Image (tube, grey):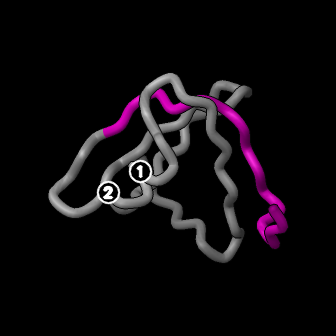
Amino acid sequence: MKTSARNQFSGKVVALLRGAVNDEVTMRTDAGQEIVAGITHENTKRLGLTAGRAAAALVKASSVILAVA
């Protein structure tokens, strides 16, 4: 797979919350940080995402949204 995303993180899915339209997937990276992504139900199913499944997050710098915690 070729991608222009330079920021890539590997880890495992630790939580999956099904919403009304999209799912919220939480992944813990190998470095211990958590990344939360909103994706469609269809893509959750297509990717076979379940808790404990290994996954990779590809982050394009122009798509990052920061918020104050």
Q: Give the extent of the magenta segment.
A: 1-16
Image-based side of 24 in relation to 21, left or right: right
How dense is the environment of label 2, judged by Cα within 10 Å: few (below 14), some, or many (20 and up)?
Answer: some
Q: Which residue bears the numbered disc 1?
A: 44
**Extreme-left residue of the structure:** 20
What residue sits 81% from the left and 72% below the top?
4
**In the image shown, does 52 or 42 lie closer to the viewer?**
42
**Label at residue 69:** none
Task: Indicate the amino acid at tag 1.
Answer: Thr
Question: Which residue is at a point 52% across and 61% down the rendered structure image?
Answer: 66
**Up-down: is 41 above or below 36?**
below
Q: Where's residue 14, x and y in %?
A: 46, 27
At mark 2, the secondary structure is helix
Q: Which residue is mark 2?
A: 41
Rendering coords of residue 43 (x, y %): 43, 58
Residue 48, image x, y percentages: 47, 42
- The verdict on residue 14 being magenta is yes
Looking at the image, which residue is at 46% across and 53% down? 46
Please determine whether, in this image, residue 68 is positioned above or below residue 53.
Answer: below
Look at the numbered disc 1 and give the secondary structure of its residue: helix
Q: Count the marks: how many?
A: 2
Q: The residue under label 2 is which amino acid type?
A: His
- Horizontally, residue 12 falls left or right of residue 21, namely right
Horizontal side of residue 51 vs 6, given as left or right: left
Quadrant position of residue 2:
bottom right
- Mark 2 and mark 1 in contact? Answer it, CB < 8 Å: yes
